[in-house]
């Protein structure tokens, strides 16, 4: 089974008032987890400590104004 890696960047600056949530402001597909992580770190401008959540995605955690998640998407 083939997979792609979907990198999602969330804008955390939209948080604040009760009931608000982050806004997804970028989605990109990659052929490897490494290339998705490299893109996110270049976009952020610094190294990111990644946390693997099960076998479904990696997260940067809240980086104050942005958060990156890389989801493993299985293709049929």
Image (cartoon, rainbow, N blue to C red):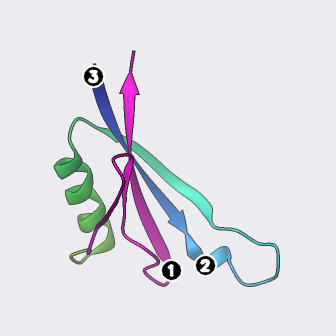
Dot 3 or dot 2: first in sequence order is 3
Which residues lie in the magenta part?
49-76
Cα separation, mark 3 vs mark 1, equals 33 Å
Dot 3 or dot 1: first in sequence order is 3
Q: What residue is shown with label 2?
A: 13
From the viewer's side, name the closer residue of 14 and 1.
1
Pick the quarter of the image with the C terminus: top left
Q: Circle 3 — which element?
A: strand
Cα separation, mark 3 vs mark 2, equals 35 Å
Residue 15, horizontal then vertical, whole percent: 68, 78
The answer to whether residue 50 is magenta is: yes
In the picture as drawn, the residue positioned furthest to the top comes out as 76
Say which residue appears at 39% left-offset and 34% top-offset: 73
| Direction from residue 29 to residue 65 in the image, left or right | right
The correct choice, above or below, for 70 with respect to 15 in the image is above
| Direction from residue 76 to residue 14 in the image, left or right | right
Image mark for residue 65 = 1
The correct choice, above or below, for 49 with respect to 76 in the image is below
């Amino acid at each position: 089974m083939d997979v792609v890696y979907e990198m999602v960047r969330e804008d955390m600056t939209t948080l604040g008032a009760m009931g608000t949530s982050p806004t997804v402001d970028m989605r990109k597909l990659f052929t490897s987890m490494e290339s998705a992580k490299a893109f996110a770190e270049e976009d952020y401008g610094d190294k990111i400590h990644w946390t693997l959540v099960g076998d479904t995605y990696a997260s940067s955690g809240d980086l104050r104004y942005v958060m990156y998640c890389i989801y493993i998407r299985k293709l049929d």
